[in-house]
Amino acid sequence: MADLLGEVDVNVSNIRPAPSRTLKLESRRKTRVLSPPLSQGRPRNNLYNENRIPALQPDTPPAIIQYDDDDGGLPPLGDNDDVIMSDQPMPSSPVARALERKSHTVPVKAEEEDDDLMEVSQAVGHSGVATASVNISGARPVPKIKKPDYPTPNSSSPTRAPADFIDPSTWNNVTSRLNVLSSPVTESVSIGKVQAKDAVEEDGSLRFFWIDYAELNGNLLLFGKAKNKLTGQYVSCLVKVDNILRKLYFLPREHRRKRGIDTSEEVDMGQVYEEVDSLMSKFGVGMHKIKPCSRKYAFELPDIPKEADYLKLLYPYDKPALAMDLQGETFSKVFGTNTSLFEQFVLWKNIMGPCWLKIEGADFESITNASWCKLEIQVNKPASITTLGDSDNLEAPPLTLMSIALRTMMNVKENKQEIIMASARIYENISLSDTTPADKLPCKTFTIMRPIGDGYPAGFKTDVEKHVGVVKLQRTEQELLSLFLARLQQIDPDVLIGHRLEDLDYSILLSRMKDRNVSGWHRIGRLRRREWPKSMGKGGGSFFAERQLVAGRLLCDLANDQGKVRDGES
């Protein structure tokens, strides 16, 4: 019977006495009746069946001890109660078995106490065991997206050699390596007009090198350089060419056309002459010349014969042009209606780009103060202008170059860029065939600026006096622009140079002069004007109007796409 019981606690009573309410005292301790010692030789059995306990009776009846619930206390003890008190649990007690199991388990890493969180550390004995991840939810995991390897500056660009040390103090010394002269800008510039006797040759002709042109009211204006024999310097010159006529060619029909229908009537040159003459009277052209001629055609129109007889019409450019698709009863096509004045002149005189021209019978008195040039002449007979050949061994005259740099500030109220500083560098008498580096060429500089706000910083004027070149301090933007134009007129440059000058600085300069109503604004070019072009500030028409205002001076934009060196090109 003892074998079946195993380790059944014989001290547990089947009869639960009624609880007696006693007073709990902190000084009193709960006692437990200890199990019998192991020396009795009872076999151990880990199976414990509570349902079999009432059917089995131990050999020795257990002492009946009344236990109370956790809510109550222990029953009162008498003076003769013998209670075994011991701090060490008996081997058969649950505490002893718990200690025994604990002694056979693998040591576990002690947990660190945390006031906020309770973290359970992994057992040290299982830290090396490889376990597979189990997808408990059964959902397909989100695929991991591999980020591409973006190129870095080190991987995409070749490594560069270590750069030499750069002293930041040299950033402000831009002109330290340039050959800047300390003399005033206007020292060598001639003042006033040049007399005709100082410019003509011994035979009375004038040698003129043209560099730019303009068309004005049916007249051709050529700008260039002529030599002042009194000083030996080349000065700016204007040549006005009058009486250049349009040249139109009418192709006769084989049969007259009436109301859009061809007839059997043959057309002769006299009938074409009568129709063209009446057409000129209709347009109010009084002076015109008509004569027959023979011309060849070598272009794309299919219905034009390669060679045929034409009727040639000459009339001034100050009269309106005819339509390109004009047709009549006696002529089917008109050529030359869209030929410009300058194109007509260079084709007639066989002029190939800027070159030396010989002008005979020039008029030096008809034009006065029509331009800002030092010499002004008028030519009434275009036939008196001829080109000088290579046999004369004449080199291109030296030019005056002027680079411009502007600094602007945004006016938030007006949403416009205002100029706060204008700086210029002047290179005089520069030959087009000279290969001297720019930093070796002698130059002169001037800078005009105005303050941002009420005044300049303390000590600024003292630092300006130490600067190489001429620096002028003005109060307002209008004074700045007026002084800049006065200096530009004195220098009279042939070429204006700048970075993004054509599409940025030049447009800003014109707009600020117009908004500030600066007098003499047309000094930006070489032609005097009374009023601003009407197309200024009106879309695409403003582009051509701005280019006309600078007539007489060439614009050289260093940021122009056509002037940039492409990759792989030398």
Image: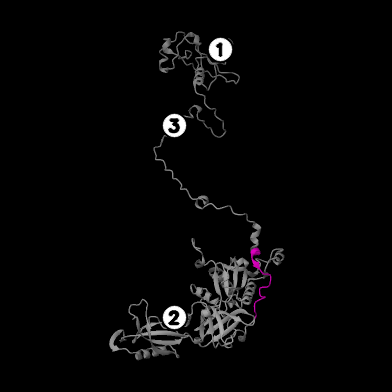
Work out whether mark 1 precedes mark 2 in sequence or the reverse, and give the earlier one. 1
Outermost residue toward the left?
264
Badge 1: how crowded within 10 Å, few (<14), some, or many (20+)? few
Q: Amino acid at mark 3?
A: Thr
Please report contact status of discs 1 and 3: CB closer than 8 Å, yes or no: no
Q: Main secondary structure of the magenta part?
A: loop
- Of the residues tagged 2 and 3, which is closer to the observer? 2
Work out whether mark 1 precedes mark 3 in sequence or the reverse, and give the earlier one. 1
Q: Look at the numbered disc 2 and give the secondary structure of its residue.
A: loop
Near-viewer residue (278 or 25):
278
- Residue hosting label 3: 131
Please provide percent x and percent y for residue 74. Answer: 55, 17
Badge 2: how crowded within 10 Å, few (<14), some, or many (20+)? few
Outermost residue toward the front?
391
Please report contact status of discs 2 and 3: CB closer than 8 Å, yes or no: no
What's the CA distance linking mark 1 and mark 3? 51 Å
The reply to whether residue 91 is in sight is yes
- Of the residues tagged 1 and 2, which is closer to the observer? 2
What's the CA distance linking mark 2 and mark 3? 92 Å
Q: Which residues are magenta?
A: 175-191
- Residue hosting label 2: 339
Identify the residue at image location x=54%, y=29%: 111
Please provide percent x and percent y for residue 338. Answer: 43, 80
Which corner quadrant of the image does residue 332 belong to?
Answer: bottom left
- Of the residues tagged 1 and 3, which is closer to the observer? 3
Q: Is residue 181 magenta?
A: yes
Q: Amino acid at mark 1?
A: Ile
Near-viewer residue (325 or 80):
325
The reply to whether residue 373 is in sight is no
Which corner quadrant of the image does residue 279 belong to?
Answer: bottom left
Badge 3: how crowded within 10 Å, few (<14), some, or many (20+)? few
- Residue hosting label 1: 84
